[in-house]
Image: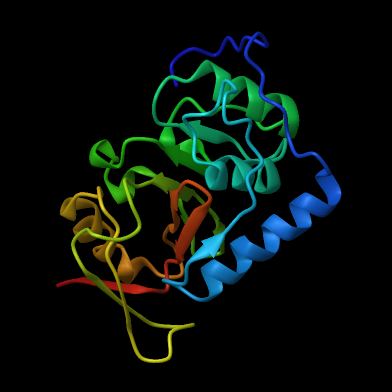
Amino acid sequence: MNDTSLSLDNLAAGLGDPVHDSQAIFRVLLDTLSRPGTLGRIQPVLDADGPLAHIPCSAFAALLTLADYATPVWIQQHDDALAATVRFHTGAPIAQHANEAAFAYIHEAADIPAADTFALGEPETPDRSTTLLIRVDALEGGRPLTLSGPGIESSVTIAPRGIPDAFWHARAELAPAFPCGIDCYLVCGAELMGIPRTTLVEMN
């Protein structure tokens, strides 16, 4: 986002039961990232007719659960309602540049920046990298991708729709930098999949 002024006019409601809801959401986020390619589902936490009805509830729930005052959030497209709501409920600052963010919400996967645009962490502090929440058109029906690595018994095939091949190529080029890298969640509606930096993604 380029505008640092945040209006409170279009704030969306947060979690109904912040403690228990965030615990349940965190378990889903942890499970899907530890088992790459596994489909997870988060119970809806958005008002279907509210100011954030255009945001997948899985992405919104993840931001409410993971973000705090010490984790800047970058939003790909200018979205005052999302920025104001995240800042109000979590205290997270809104990052002006992708490489400053702990979490990044990508609303248009077709225009996702190159993987190395985001913070990759340092060898001593690999956790200081950006976690991406990428909205996809669907979690199936796209180009098949074969995942392998930790958390996968052999391999698993997924087919998210809407992410350009260039992103996966750029992500693969980050492999030599491990333990640095980026972790990703693919989000669609209430569903999501995790793809951590340890996962090898091959295009079929």
| Residue 201 appears left or right of 30 | left
Q: Which of 142 and 112 is in front in this view?
A: 142
| Residue 155 appears left or right of 194 | left
| Residue 35 appears left or right of 114 | right
Q: Is residue 204 depicted above or below 131 in this figure?
A: below
Q: How many marks on residues?
A: 0
Give coordinates of residue 109: x percent, y percent.
Answer: 30, 42
Q: Is residue 90 depicted above or below 195 in this figure?
A: above
> Which quadrant of the rendered structure holds the C terminus?
bottom left
Structure colour scheme: rainbow
Residue 143 visible in the snapshot: yes
Q: Is residue 53 depicted above or below 33 in this figure?
A: above
Furthest residue in direction bottom, as rendered: 154
Residue name at image x 21 percent, y 68 percent: 144
Residue name at image x 66 percent, y 48 percent: 66
Give coordinates of residue 112: x percent, y percent.
Answer: 29, 40
Q: Which of 94 and 52 is in front in this view?
A: 52
Give coordinates of residue 37: x percent, y percent.
Answer: 41, 71
Residue name at image x 43 percent, y 16 percent: 2
| Residue 33 appears left or right of 14 | left
Residue 119 visible in the snapshot: no
